[in-house]
Amino acid sequence: MTTHAMENRKNLLARMEAGSMALIWSGSAPHRTTDQHYAYTPQRNFFYLTNVNEPNMVLMMLKGENDTHSCLFIEENTDHIIKWEGARMEKAKAAELSGIDESNIMYEKQFKPYVAQVMNYARSVIGKPPKTLYLDLYHVKPDEKPIALDQAGFILANYKELDIKAINEHTSYLRMVKRDVEITEMAKAIEHTRKGLETIMKNLPSRTHEYQLEADFLHEITLAGSEGNAFDTIAAGGANATVLHYVANRDALDKDSLILFDLGALHNNYAADISRTYPVSGKFTKRQRDLYQIVLDVNKATIAMVKPGVTWKELNAFAKTMLIKQAKKHRLIKNDAEINELYYHSIGHFIGLDVHDVGHYDLPLKPGMVLTIEPGLYVKDEGIGIRIEDDVLVTEKGYRNLSEGIIKEIDDIEAFMKPYRQ
């Protein structure tokens, strides 16, 4: 049976140079306190290429002049692991998920000897030792060394003849266009998010603090089957909503204010990313309604622009121009440049296995891409921040709003919240 991970590896191997080796580690949970670790989350390129969600594994992909070869190195179970932490994935299950033949799945203790075999002219499984080594060379910060350089340290120290190249250019290109199975997983994450936001709207008029609503969301999406938050929830009441990445979520709620939520659930490592802005009381004031409608109109008009061939630059320019026109109409600004004080981010980003997913933003949109459309308006002097964000799939002829089931019209929000108003 062909799995989507097999297809992903096939496509990546096609982009790799002949005479090369790619190594991608699954990662491990970093240390947190004396006796605990953070929750494990898989390295996204590893998951994309294997469909395996386990720590302490290594994927090796080899490309010779005439053939290719993939193998997976996994943790071996011990009595201690089984009794204290739970059994690790067995070879048969790893083979089922990844599509790698069980004969090519080995234990991690075999990794270094196998590298030595690959690099041996007499024994290499691709005829000749590879000349190029592909690694994930993502920089968390400009002055921080990529983790893969440490993970592959013994190879770099002993096989200096290898030419090191970044796999990221290729994985970013491939992950940019989603398969049907990926879109299905994202739709499930969005559905969890819808349920979480509806619980928030029901509870909002009776809650007193931002953190209670953050908890309501996590509780609901977890009950629905999500693995949890795709990113730290923003529950920003009043002027807190004018801070783009406000995540403290500790302040008391003002019943006369708006509250901005930027949040999303995970499903099988695929993310949703949705923003909605609600009146705490359940009913918009005239001023809140006017400003909200500006952002909603821009959100809907920009989504309607999405189709193959459109560029990110065009989407950004369209949204900003429309915001400028409306901000002038409502006397928020006098000249175009002042919009930067009310709207200080771009119109959106790719989304998938990462919330801000990898991709090439200089390329025109293609069918299968999934992006966010998220205009905003932030009027600090009035204590108002509004953002409305949807997750949009590019189709052959246009777009499909994957989050269209999450209400955002003023009348719909007020009607939904009316039974719960105090």
Image (tube, rainbow, N blue to C red):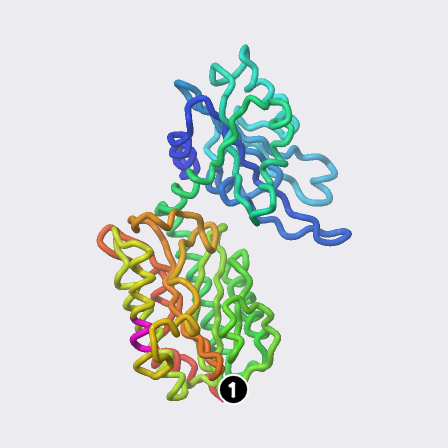
Q: Nearer the viewer, residue 349 or 118?
A: 349
Side of 252 where 82 appears, left or right: right
The quadrant where residue 56 appears: top right
- Please tell me whether the stretch drawn in magenta is mainly helix, strand or loop: helix
Q: Is residue 406 above or below residue 91?
A: below
Q: Residue 315: image x %, image y %?
A: 31, 60
Q: Residue 17: image x %, image y %?
A: 42, 26
Q: Residue at 47% x, 25% y: name it.
A: 20
Q: Quadrant of the N terminus?
A: top left
Q: Residue 349: image x %, image y %?
A: 40, 57
Q: Is residue 96 above or below residue 419?
A: above
Q: Secondary structure at mark 1?
A: loop
Q: Nearer the viewer, residue 341 or 102?
A: 341
Q: Residue at 50% x, 21% y: name it.
A: 130
Side of 364 where 212 appears, left or right: right
Magenta stretch contains residue 214: no
Side of 326 where 217 appears, left or right: right
| Residue located farthest toward the right when viewing the structure as drawn | 34
Q: Is residue 57 above or below residue 420?
A: above
| Residue located farthest toward the left when viewing the structure as drawn | 397
Q: Residue at 47% x, 14% y: name it.
A: 127
Q: Nearer the viewer, residue 249 or 295?
A: 295
Please tell me how many numbered marks the rendered image carries.
1
Q: Residue 144: image x %, image y %?
A: 60, 45
Mark 1: amino acid: Lys
| Residue located farthest toward the top when viewing the structure as drawn | 122
Residue at the spot of label 1: 255
At label 1, counting other C-alpha atoms closer than 10 Å, the crowd grade (few under 14, some 14-19, many 20 or more) is some
Q: Is residue 126 above or below residue 185?
A: above
Q: Which residues are magenta?
A: 322-327
